[in-house]
């Protein structure tokens, strides 16, 4: 469904026991199936966009991200755990600032903008991992997808829906067993700290030193020069007397 479509102009969501938001009703009950349909809240959106920043240098396409979600603003509360949301024209990247909820545009299943988004970040995550770590064998897209399927196998078998926030985050935070992006962050922080310490030492070394009475380097240099000259030409000893003594012996 195009984002300009007027069919989906509002939806109602509730806060589940898992502290995630789930859709309970939409203005388009023909094209949208609310069974297991979830939305991303402003706090979750901020975390996703912060994490996704690491993929920019590997070819992140903002237009794919933009098309993947439909933004909604808060209209009114419904009871103790419900909210009515209205369709918004704001950019999805303004979700945290504008306090917007993001609904994944998955109406067309595998060919939906949301499905394209998942494929996009999966490829970039694998590309980032292979460029960052020195694996004996490169990670493949199938490796990532298979591990995620295994993680949710029980949920799939029991018909439990996977919240969209967890689905996205599992891709963005995927790292093969035995490796950790946190270790890289620690190394970067250590390297940055060492560079800052070096800069501080360099700054101190370059500071102007004010000479006082205890710092007479010029005079000392002159004294050393005179001593050097003294030892450059040593006094020649007269060994003639020793030769005379030898003759007497």
Image (tube, rainbow, N blue to C red):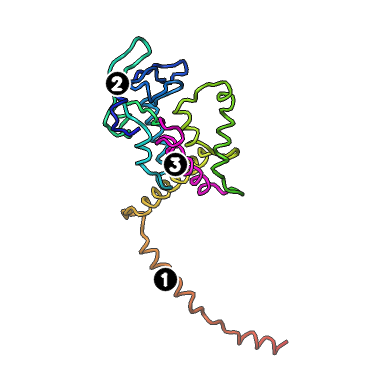
Mark pair 2, 3: CA separation: 29 Å
Q: Which residue is mark 1?
A: 225
The reply to whether the magenta stretch includes residue 3 is no
- Mark 1 burial class by Cα count in 10 Å: few <14, some 14-19, many 20+: few
Mark pair 3, 1: CA separation: 74 Å
The reply to whether the magenta stretch includes residue 115 is yes
Q: Which residue is mark 2?
A: 74
Query: For residue 68, what is the image quadrant?
Result: top left
| Marks 2 and 3 in Cβ contact (< 8 Å) | no
Among the two numbered marks 2 and 3 on one chain, the one whose residue lies closer to the N terminus: 2
Q: Residue at x 49, y 25 (%)?
A: 162
Q: Which mark is residue 244?
A: none
Q: Which residue is mark 3?
A: 120
Among the two numbered marks 2 and 1 on one chain, the one whose residue lies closer to the N terminus: 2
Q: Is residue 115 visible?
A: yes
Residue 99: give x, y in percent of width and height: 31, 25
- Residue sitting nearer the eye, 182 or 248: 182
Foreground mark, 2 or 1?
Answer: 2
Mark pair 2, 1: CA separation: 85 Å
- Residue sitting nearer the eye, 124 or 63: 63
Foreground mark, 3 or 1?
Answer: 3
Residue 37: give x, y in percent of width and height: 43, 23
């Amino acid at each position: 469904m195009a984002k300009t479509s007027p069919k989906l102009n509002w939806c109602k969501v509730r806060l589940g026991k898992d502290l995630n938001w789930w859709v309970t009703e939409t203005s388009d009950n023909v094209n949208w199936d609310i069974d297991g349909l979830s939305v991303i809240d402003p706090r979750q959106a901020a975390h996703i966009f912060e994490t996704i920043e690491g993929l920019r240098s590997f070819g992140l396409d903002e237009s794919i991200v933009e098309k993947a979600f439909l933004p909604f603003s808060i209209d009114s509360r419904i009871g103790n755990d419900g909210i009515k949301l209205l369709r918004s024209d704001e950019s999805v990247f303004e979700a945290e600032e504008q306090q917007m909820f993001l609904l994944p545009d998955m109406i067309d299943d595998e060919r939906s903008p949301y499905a394209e988004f998942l494929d996009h970040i999966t490829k970039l995550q694998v590309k980032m991992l292979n460029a960052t770590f020195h694996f004996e064998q490169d990670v493949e897209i199938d490796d990532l997808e298979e591990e995620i399927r295994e993680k949710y196998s029980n949920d799939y078998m029991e018909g439990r829906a996977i919240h969209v926030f967890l689905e996205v985050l599992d891709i963005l935070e995927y790292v093969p067993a035995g490796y950790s992006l946190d270790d890289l962050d620690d190394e970067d922080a250590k390297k940055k700290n060492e560079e800052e310490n070096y800069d501080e030492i360099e700054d101190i070394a370059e500071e102007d030193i004010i000479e006082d009475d205890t710092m007479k380097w010029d005079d000392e240099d002159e004294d050393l020069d005179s001593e050097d000259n003294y030892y450059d030409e040593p006094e020649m000893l007269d060994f003639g007397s020793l030769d005379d003594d030898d003759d007497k012996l």
